Image (spheres, helix red, strand yellow):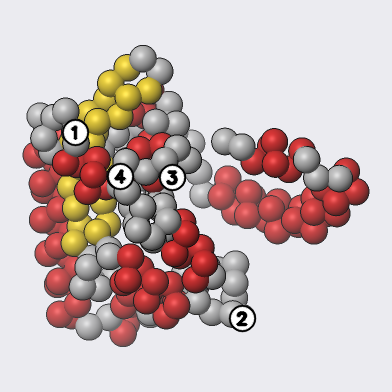
Amino acid sequence: AGIPARLGALDGAIRSSLEAALEQDGRRLLEEKLAGYPEGLDGRTLVIEFARGGPQGSSMPLPEHYGYAHSLARLAPEILERASILYIWVTPEESRRKNEQRADPNDPGSILHHGVPIEVMLNDYGCDDMDWLEQNTERPGTVTVKTGGKTFFLPVARFDNREDKTTFIREDPEKWPEEKVRALRSELKRALDQLFERAKG
């Protein structure tokens, strides 16, 4: 998606230096990921996480290389034929607040405590196109994805996290407040029930 061309423009010595610096971490991450793979996917649900957006204040539809429309169209037809979307609905402002709150400068590679610079939050996650995709779909309750000469209708539902329901789960489960667990379960059940109904057709 453009990275090989950009990296290819770098001097060979710089590329070699980058490879050496990233090799150990990259290998460790890959080995951890591969160790978690099941032998097969029969009877399982595969979750593919996307965090896609565009510059703050962008008009819709977002330009190529930005947003969910661009990324969803890059998935294989075999995935799109069976895919559904559970959209975690967070405002850009709340997303920036959560990014700042969770960032741990002593653990920058952490899955739970990573953060990105404010410039990235504003220019890559300043808005997203999910509202636009839902409002401009060809079939209500879905997101229309056109790719490879085919049209796919992905059922969509929203988990409303505009008022934070999830941050507490970063803590030790023994410390989870019961009322927050109930609120999380309730909203997750509501969203997944809606998604299930839409996926049934």
Q: Residue at x 48, y 36 (%)?
A: 39
Q: Residue at x 20, y 57 (%)?
A: 159
What is the CA distance from the residue labelled 2 to the residue labelled 4? 38 Å
Is residue 97 or residue 59 the one in the foreground?
59
- The correct choice, above or below, for 80 with respect to 111 in the image is above
**First of labels 1, 3 by sequence position:** 3
The kind of residue tagged 3 is Tyr
The kind of residue tagged 1 is Thr
Helix, strand, or loop for circle 2? loop
Helix, strand, or loop for circle 4? loop
Which circle, 1 or 2, is nearer the viewer?
A: 1
**Which residue is disc 4 drawn over?**
60
The kind of residue tagged 2 is Asn
**Which residue is disc 2 drawn over?**
106
**Which residue is disc 1 drawn over?**
137
**First of labels 3, 4 by sequence position:** 4
**First of labels 1, 4 by sequence position:** 4
The kind of residue tagged 4 is Met
Helix, strand, or loop for circle 1? loop
Quadrant (top left/top right/bottom left/bottom right) for the C terminus: top left
**First of labels 1, 2 by sequence position:** 2
Which circle, 2 or 3, is nearer the viewer?
A: 3
Residue 48, visible in the rendered structure: no
Residue at the outermost right position: 13
